[in-house]
Amino acid sequence: MHYQLKYLTLLVAFFFISINCFSQEIPKKPDFIPPIIDSTNTLSSNQKQALYDKLRNYSDTTSTEILVIIQKSTYGEDIAMYSTELGHKWEIGKRGKENGVVFLITIDDHKLWIASGYGVEHLLTDAMSKRIVEEIIIPSFKKGNFYEGIDNGTTAIMQVLSGEFKGVPSTKSEGIPVIFIIILFIILLIILSNR
């Protein structure tokens, strides 16, 4: 019994050590962090330059930093945790304001996440980020147009942070309003009860 417990303890310890060895560590903060990092060459150099100019101009005029990262994978690490940790470790956003946004895309994992710093999370909430991802970014990605998705997604983030985001207009038919159905039902009941 004593040997079994010792064996089990060693097995559990080995399991946690192996998880730590194979989990993706956040890279060391580089000396210079451009607003777009594409280690997968998903975007063309012209597309990267256009995003660089757009995001750099936004940072210069608002002090809010948006960092777009395209990489292969987080190698088993939860993308939400990874992007949030990266934002903290790399100090995205102005010091003391914590007004940075990390927009992480993993090509091989087919995942993306928008992580907000503490200074902007009251505006760019998880629910709002999810809406941007589902309504704006994913439709472009599904067509294979990564640049369009990233460009429109970063524009939507900027609009949210300035209070101008309206979302995507619905193209679906709204159908019959519920109140109309209720009124019709009440009228039908009155007619049938008078018979």
Image: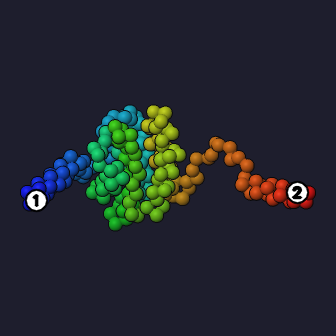
Q: What is the quadrant of the N terminus in the image? A: bottom left
Q: What is the quadrant of the C terminus in the image? A: bottom right
Task: Identify the colour scheme used.
Answer: rainbow
Residue 187 appears in which quarter of the rendering? bottom right
Residue 166 visible in the picture:
yes
User: Who's the residue at 38% across and 57% down the image?
Assistant: 100
User: Who's the residue at 50% across and 55% down the image?
Assistant: 128
Residue 53 visible in the picture:
no
Q: Percent from the top left, x then y, of residue 41?
A: 33, 34
Q: CA distance from mark 2 to mark 1?
A: 81 Å
The disc at residue 191 is 2
Closer to us: 79 or 194: 194
Closer to us: 111 or 51: 111
Picture layout, residue 96 above or below residue 35: below
- Where disc 1 sits, the SS reads loop
User: Who's the residue at 81% across and 59% down the image?
Assistant: 186
According to the picture, the residue beneath numbered tag 1 turns out to be 1
Amino acid at the residue labelled 1: Met
In the rendered structure, which disc, 2 or 1, sits on the residue that comes first in sequence?
A: 1
User: Who's the residue at 46% across and 37% down the image?
Assistant: 141
Q: Work out which residue is located at the far right of the displayed protein and give it.
A: 195
Amino acid at the residue labelled 2: Ile
